[in-house]
Amino acid sequence: MKRISIATGGTGGVYYPYGGGIAKIISENIAGVEATAEATAASVDNLKFLRDGRSDIAFSMADTVEDAALARGPFTEFGKVPSRTLAVLYSNYLHLATVANTGISTIADLKGKVVSTGAPGSGTEILAFRTLEASGLDPKSDVTTQALGASQSVDALKDGKVHAFFFTGGLPTAAVLDLTHSPGITAKLIASDAAIPKMREKYGESMYYPVVIPKAVYSLSEDVTVVGVANLLVVSESMTDELAYNITRLLFEKQAELIAIHPQARDLSLATAVVGSPVPFHPGAIRYYTEKNAWRP
């Protein structure tokens, strides 16, 4: 029995349940393979686990995958992580959450406040810092940062220990849903799309793009436009072509099962799965997309 590990994220996000679904369809449909989803601090750590051989498949945001491929940012000392993409899964939405009594309605209002910028070793941390910088704030001196995961950030906000928190995830993100449905609390999400032009100047035209969180998702008073970034499912370049092909095939053939586990799996399509990866696709995945006439070299 070949055992493979899927590095996901915190239990309050989307990566963890989505990864659990992928582990299930792999274990049930590929003979001789048993897959397990592991809760982690998400993108940065996932890629480190991938290179160290502790994980075989990793969820990660596109900007973190690029940093890892170039040994940039949090990978400067760790070194390059040569990953290969199976699919671009869905967009992550930058949630910047606060509550009504903090007086925060824009990113500029975070100056002098206590803000959670995501778990150490998460893609949220990278994106939060980049968004603050593009909005004219220095994350080291203009705000007091706490490094908390999604669920811990919600608890800290409810307890008045932080004024706001960043979390980048799919829709809905369980921890944010918990916050917006807490009795006696009026939660707010803050727009971040104004930071995108500066982020594009620094990190390229295609990495960040505006996405809309519809008000119905979290029972908000209005839609909120925020920073979007693609989520990738990546593997080690040493994965066999056959295994990479079969995993990619199952993402599509068993999509209904994945949607039943988390609705974000609805966003996967042949047209979008092949667009937006900063690293090459695995040859096994390319074989599947080519068979389906979806590959765009």
Image (cartoon, helix red, strand yellow):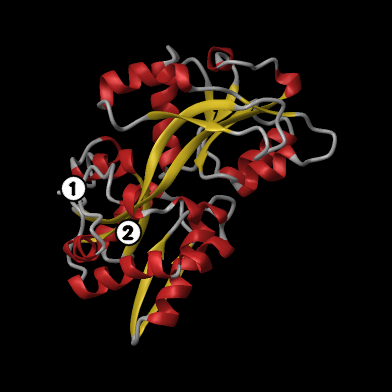
Q: Residue 266, position in %: x, y?
A: 50, 54
**For residue 17, what is the image quadrant?**
bottom right
**Amino acid at pointer 1:** Lys
Judging depth in this view, the residue of 269 and 168 nearest the camera is 269
The image position of residue 18, as x and y in percent, is 49, 60
The residue that disc 2 covers is 49
Secondary structure beneath dot 2 equals helix
Give the residue at x 31% y 38%: 63
Q: Amino acid at mark 2?
A: Phe
Q: What residue do we see at 18% from left, 71% from top?
A: 241
Instruction: Kindly tell me whether residue 138 is visible in this rendering.
Output: no
Secondary structure of the residue carrying tag 1 is: loop
Q: Position of residue 224 (x, y in %)?
A: 58, 26
- Height in image: 257 above or below 144? below
Asked whether, in this view, residue 108 is left or right of residue 243, the answer is right
Compute the Cα span from label 1 to label 2: 12 Å
Q: Earlier in the sequence, mark 1 or mark 2?
A: 2
In this figure, which residue is indicated by the disc labeled 1? 80
Which residue is farthest front?
A: 293
Q: Residue furthest right?
A: 184
